[in-house]
């Protein structure tokens, strides 16, 4: 597909057929990567949750998943370094959520990923709870 056609189809701020805008997709991927690394154990089942969800997306071809994923992983791992970094990471995710539907999708997928390996990590669930609280506060 030519870059002119791509720009016409994926104009900045437009919602694709998956119902999400690109910043929402990226925020959800960031949160999923954080959950995957939060328990210090990466399970095949967790990577499958991300891969399966990614296949359903209308990822912007001007910003492909393959180039975004390494940045997302780096940001998630950096957020694990301190409480302040984690809170800034959560706020970054919240700022990119544009609708209640995308926020619901975010939390549902995080819970699914946290349960995917059969172990409930305190780190994963503390992150999900903090993320849920931040989203609820942002709605007010």
Image (spheres, rainbow, N blue to C red):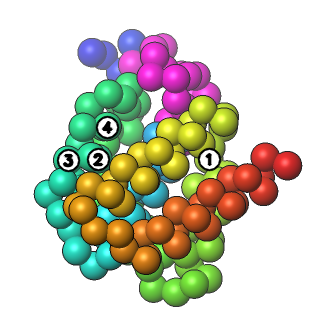
Q: Residues within 10 Å of mark 1 (few under 14, many from 20)?
A: some
Is 7 a magenta residue?
yes
State the separation of the CA atoms marked 3 and 4.
Answer: 8 Å
Q: Secondary structure at mark 1?
A: helix
Residue at the image position 60 percent from the left and 32 percent from the top: 101
Residue at the image position 20 percent from the left and 47 percent from the top: 48
Q: Please name which of the two marks, 1 or 4, marks the residue nearer to the observer.
A: 4
Circle 3 residue: 48
Q: Position of residue 131 (x, y in %)?
A: 60, 61
The correct choice, above or below, for 10 with respect to 87 in the image is above
Q: Secondary structure at mark 4?
A: helix
Looking at the image, do the residues carrying marks 2 and 3 touch, with CB atoms under 8 Å apart? Answer: yes
Labels 1 and 2: the sequence-earlier one: 2
Q: Please name which of the two marks, 1 or 2, marks the residue nearer to the observer.
A: 2
Circle 1 residue: 96
Circle 2 residue: 50
Labels 3 and 1: the sequence-earlier one: 3
Looking at the image, do the residues carrying marks 1 and 2 touch, with CB atoms under 8 Å apart? Answer: no
Residue at the image position 56 percent from the left and 79 percent from the top: 85
Numbered label attached to residue 53: 4
Q: Is residue 138 left or right of residue 29?
A: right
Q: Secondary structure at mark 2?
A: helix
State the separation of the CA atoms marked 3 and 1.
Answer: 24 Å
Residue 123 vs residue 20, the one in the foreground: 123
Labels 1 and 4: the sequence-earlier one: 4
State the separation of the CA atoms marked 2 and 3.
Answer: 5 Å
Q: Where does the magenta region start and end?
A: 6-23
């Amino acid at each position: 597909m030519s870059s002119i056609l791509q720009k016409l189809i994926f104009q900045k701020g437009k919602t694709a057929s998956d119902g999400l805008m690109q910043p929402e997709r990226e925020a959800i991927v960031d949160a999923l990567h954080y959950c995957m690394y939060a328990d210090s154990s990466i399970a095949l089942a967790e990577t499958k949750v991300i891969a399966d969800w990614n296949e359903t997306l209308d990822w912007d071809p001007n910003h492909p998943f393959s180039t975004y994923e390494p940045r997302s992983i780096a940001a998630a791992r950096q957020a694990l370094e301190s409480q302040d970094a984690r809170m800034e990471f959560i706020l970054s995710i919240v700022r990119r959520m544009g609708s209640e539907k995308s926020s619901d999708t975010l939390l549902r997928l995080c819970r699914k990923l946290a349960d995917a390996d059969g172990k409930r990590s305190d780190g994963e669930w503390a992150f999900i709870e903090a993320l849920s609280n931040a989203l609820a506060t942002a709605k007010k």
